[in-house]
Image (spheres, rainbow, N blue to C red):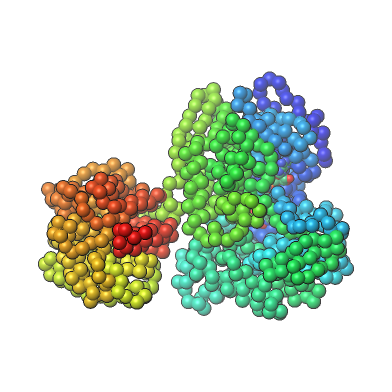
Amino acid sequence: MSVDVNEDISESTGTGRPDFDVVVVGAGMAGLYLLYRLRHLGLSAVALEAADDVGGTWYWNRYPGARCDIQSIDYSYSFDPELESEWEWSEKYATQPEILRYLQFVADKHDLRRDIRFSTRVGAAKWDDASSMWRVRTDAGAEVTCRHYVMATGCLSMPKGPEIRGAERFAGPVYFTSRWPHDGVDFTGLRVGVIGTGSSGIQSIPIIASQASELTVFQRTPNFSMPAGNGPIPEQKLAAIAADPEAYRREARLSGAGVPMPKPTVGALQVSEAERLEAFERVWRQGELLAVNSEFNDLSIRREANDTFAEFIRNKIRSTVHDRETAETLCPTDHPVGSKRPCLDTNYYETFNLPHVRLVDLRKDPISTITETGIDTSNESFEFDVIVYATGFDAMTGALVAVDIEGRDGVTLKDKWAAGPRTYLGLTTVGFPNFFMVTGPGSPSVLSNMVVSIEQHVDWITDCVSDLRDRGYTTIEPTETAEAGWVQHVNDCADITLFPSANSWYMGANVPGKPRVFLPYVGGVGPYRITCDRVVDEGYLGFRLAGDAGTQCHDGVVNRLQPDVAMLLQTLAELGLPPLESLPVPEARAFNEAISAQRPPGPEVGDVADGTLPGAEGELNYRIYRPATPGPHPIVVYFHGGGWVLGSHVSDEPLCRDLCVRSGALIVSVDYRHGPETRFPAAANDAIAAVYWVAANAESLGGAPGGLAVAGWSAGGNLAAVACQQARWAGEPEIVGQLLIAPATDGASEWPSMAENAEGYALTASLMDWFWNNYADPADRSDAKASPLRAESLAGLPRAAIFTCEFDPLRDEGDAYAAALVAAGVDVEHVQCRGHIHTSLHAVDVIISGAPLRARMAAAIQGFFRSPNAT
Ligand SMILES: Cc1cc2nc3c(=O)[nH]c(=O)nc-3n(C[C@H](O)[C@H](O)[C@H](O)COP(=O)(O)OP(=O)(O)OC[C@H]3O[C@@H](n4cnc5c(N)ncnc54)[C@H](O)[C@@H]3O)c2cc1C
């Protein structure tokens, strides 16, 4: 099938026009669909493919046992409804030969081969700025030019070398799972060594064991694997698709991982142990990688929840593998389940019960060298007839940087990505105009059913190219701002999960010297698709277009909210809750309490006690949260949020618990009188009275001598700031620090953030207005007791830690207070919380991305109690 490349593609037209609208590299699943789509859009295209046939992954990976591990019926194209009825999968998880036949069938059905040049490896590609085209060179020296250049080179197509000393010395046959001989390998009667226990190792080991006379498996890191339960396609699945094929595919496209799955509403730790184990058993029997995430919603974000599933799998391994030591060696303990690619297997663990199969733990007994006749570990010499390497891939970036791709100003992709890949949407990268990647780093790719991701990328790229053509634009390139924003967003998403805690190929950790960067996008294929579509709908947000039609650049960042904040806001929007300000005050309070009752409770503290204290005019309730450590402890007097209208001394319980545990301080959460029943300055006066009382009774409450700190969120932040000012003017009590979380500091001005963030971010401008109206008359709002920013002087106030949130109507007044304190010579730690909303920092165990910020609050509290000169 090899074609003379020189004859076919080196004929540059010499007209200044490129040879093709689009050159595609790769003829796997992505390359095939690209050709199909480009042709239907009337764009000229050629695909250059190193192999001598189509198939990509399924062309190269012919090792025994190779199968998909997303159900075949899901792991299928959806672009051609006819194809769906023409092709019938024989099994739940199809074998490599069947998937390859499927891709060949697609290529033939749509006559795609005529636009593919096989046995053609692309070695270099260079952007020619003068003519706005790419010059693509093959290893054989042929050149082809194109307007747009698409790398459809696959995430898992660049095999990783063995990187073991002496690898070249072995005299017998050596096989790589990713480059398996086309006519197969017969291991009958042979002594075989297999290195690697990732997905390919786990799939091939049982079959190699069934033929070999002796099999030794060298394992560096054990992986979590579950039984595939292969067999006929489950009836339920067939029925779901038959009922409404289009709806089924649509659901897949909008799902988290590209397969329709129920969305769980509970966490693994929110149910009893019996219920949890029953759910895990269901998952185990179901034999579907993604099933576990349909049972519980916290396995990929909460370590303790994940541990329960990890232990369940370890117990399965222990009950399957007879030899105790071997079983323990097979039990993964160094990473959460799912943080490395989990596997599906057929009799993998059972294989280690066979008398001729042995497991070597390379962490205890590492390979020292490969010899002419086998493998030497530090403790033993092994003789083999054959060695099999199942050592995986230089994933996601390997095939991209293997081509010498040179963009604008001579910068190569490899150099640009030396510290890790930077992309916009995983589709494009700054400095490389008209260059696209299918399932590139920064897109859901390997964390999804890849057919769904491939189709989405191909649709986006081809729609974009034809749109540019139709509108008279020749080039498209992302902006620095958009790319930096996307890289940040990809990291923000990863950071709230357990993924970065594992040394996985998702992190580049399997390739020596590769930067440790989380490569795929964990935000989910549905949200990702919506984001990509929004970019187009907003006039190619973050892209610069140029051509005969002129230039266009709508610069900006597409997803600026923290990912969990965005999810929370979406959930709130779906609930369609009434605006609080539309309710009478008692109903608003009852509603607020009902919502609060459903929150996670916050962490365990040493002790919780309730009491009353004298307020400015009558008793006030308080609740004390004591650390579990022996006292006395530093004391923080805390004021709750709720706009001086809602809430009580217990309404910020999760936050108080969290601050107590993290800081080791005793938190006294104090109530105060609320509007509209008792208006300004009642709440402020109560706050001041409470601070006096706690200071006077510090010792009996279990507090350490030497002053106290105050803290508060929202309206409580306002009261904490007011209490500090009043204490300073009165000369007592001694306040060593003030922690102000998204505080209201100025009710008398119109700050831009009040308009900018007026709606859509939980606290609205109209709710804030309602709060102020219930609390203080307009004439009173200039009083420093209502608006601490309006105080005549802020000099001499205690140290402050001020946390303001980017998408909070109160952001600017909080920022202004921090700036004013600094100007007055106060020691201020001002933390501007990127991508957060007013309620983010308060939502303990709901907004995971708020946790590091609360850790900073706790550190600030600890800092308040250190002497200013201490380091
Ligand atoms: C063993 C294995 C099992 C998998 N199972 C699943 C699964 O169950 N579900 C799932 O969603 N995903 C699975 N994957 C991921 C799989 O790679 C994708 O699902 C999909 O097949 C990728 O298609 P692609 O066209 O993007 O890339 P590939 O299939 O990798 O094709 C890329 C092609 O580009 C060619 N190429 C690369 N560089 C060059 C160059 N410089 N010049 C010319 N040609 C080049 C390669 O030869 C290759 O043919 C699996 C991967 C492996 C390795």
Q: Quadrant of the C terminus?
A: bottom left
Q: Position of residue 438 (x, y in %)?
A: 62, 44
Q: Position of residue 385 (x, y in %)?
A: 86, 64
View extreme (top): residue: 15
Residue ID at (72%, 30%):
144
Q: Quadrant of residue 693?
A: bottom left
Residue ID at (27%, 71%):
704
Q: Is residue 291 left or right of residue 3?
A: left
Q: Is residue 163 left or right of residue 279?
A: right
Q: Position of residue 3 (x, y in %)?
A: 81, 36
In this rendered view, identify the residue nearer to me: 458 or 415.
Answer: 415
Q: Quadrant of residue 371?
A: bottom right
Instruction: Decide if residue 401 is in sight here.
Output: yes
Q: Position of residue 683 (x, y in %)?
A: 17, 61
Residue ID at (65%, 40%):
151
Depicted 106 relative to depicted 548: above or below: below
In this rendered view, identify the residue nearer to me: 646 or 801.
Answer: 801
Give the mark count: 0
Instruction: Decide if residue 854 is in sight here.
Output: no
Q: Quadrant of residue 143?
A: top right
In this rendered view, identify the residue nearer to me: 358 or 561.
Answer: 358
Q: Quadrant of the N terminus?
A: top right
Depicted 638 relative to depicted 102: above or below: below
Residue ID at (68%, 45%):
399
Q: Is residue 258 left or right of residue 775?
A: right
